[in-house]
Image (tube, rainbow, N blue to C red):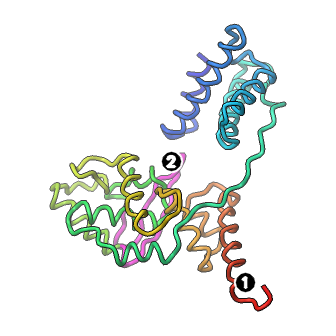
Amino acid sequence: MYKDLFLKYLQFEKRFSANTIKSYKNDLDQFADFVVLNFDDKKIHLVNEKVVRAWIVSLMEKDFSSTSINRKISSLKTFYKFLLREGHIKSNPMDKVVSPKVAKKLPTFVEEKQIINLLDDYSFGDDFAGIRNKTIIEMFYNTGMRLSELIGLRDNSLDLNNNSIKVLGKRNKERIVPLSISFVKSLKKYIEVRNAEFQQKSNEHYLFVTDKGNKLYEKFVYRIVNRYLNLVTTIEKKSPHVLRHTFATHLLNRGADLNSIKELLGHANLAATQVYTHNTFEKLKSIYKQAHPRA
């Protein structure tokens, strides 16, 4: 019962995305199963910090990463904070729980010459699918938007007269991202080909569609990005999020300030954006070693 109330709170009051709510639900279900299996049917709203710690240890023994464990801990913290505020529990079992330390990983990105080579020198094809695929990759690289944000784009998200696009981000927060003149030309060409292919002229229509004219889905877009990045880079991860990292890293390397990048990415705070400074510092060290006589 309490879990259902919490999930409705996330959906209607916090306005979290369906994927985020699903992650919370999965974490709570896993914890509830652990409690039932190991603590004689004890309900999750009645547990103490020792039960939570036991669960964390079990996750470590199953070789869950620190990142995954911390996300699950975060889910529990939000859940019990909600129960405490609503008066369903008298004390928060998470108050004495310490999250495991996570080693910081630098964002993976595609080198500038590689992404330019892909967009300028590789043939995507002149049919609808080829033009759409190239435009999708250009959209990620030109705007730094998230996968879910790209899938949700509609024709009326675009303001081609002012060379900009309205992006609906996390928690329904809107932001305006500028578009280059050259990319606007690509978008106009794509829309013309799409409309001829599917005879869609509604301004409410989804901007990017499948080969059958339906709304995109995550795996479809992931396969497109992975396929084409494989042509130019050997980095392990080749996902839409890597193109988001690439957008931010290239802007920073070319002198953009962190606050501007923060706004373009739709980050809630500057701390999330500062991770890209590590990549820039690595680039500076590389330049220093190559250029300094005593390096």
> Mark 1 — residue?
288
- The answer to whether the residues at label 2 and label 1 have Cβ atoms under 8 Å apart is no
Query: Magenta stretch containing residue 58, yes or no?
Result: no
Q: Looking at this view, is 42 or 37 the one in front?
A: 37
Extreme-top residue of the structure: 40
| Residue 154: image location, x then y, percent | 34, 55
Instruction: Write the residue at 49% across / 39% down.
Output: 19
Residue 269 occupies which quadrant of the picture? Answer: bottom right
Rounded to the nearest angstrom, the CA distance separating label 2 from label 1 is 43 Å
Front in this rendered view, residue 60 or 180: 60
Amino acid type, residue under disc 2 in the picture: Asn
Other-residue count near label 2 (Cα within 10 Å), few / some / many at <14 / 14–19 / ≥20: few
Kindly identify the residue that appears in the image at 75 percent across and 29 percent down. Answer: 57
Q: Is residue 153 left or right of residue 131?
A: right
Secondary structure state at the residue bearing disc 2:
helix
Mark 1 lies on a secondary structure that is: helix
Q: Quadrant of residue 135?
A: bottom left
Residue 244 on image: x %, y %? 52, 61
> With respect to residue 279, does 43 lie above or below?
above
Magenta residue check for 177: yes
The residue that label 2 is drawn on is 172
- Can you name the residue that lies furthest to the right here? 96
Quarter assignment of residue 229:
bottom left
Residue 27, placed above or below residue 130: above
The residue under the point 53% across, 48% down is 170
Image point (50%, 40%), residue name: 17
**Residue density around tag 1, few if under 14, some if 14–19, many if 20 or more, within 10 Å:** few
The disc labelled 1 sits on which kind of residue? Tyr
- Which quadrant of the figure contains the N terminus? top right
**Residue 295's x, y, as percent?**
78, 84
Segment colored magenta: 158-183
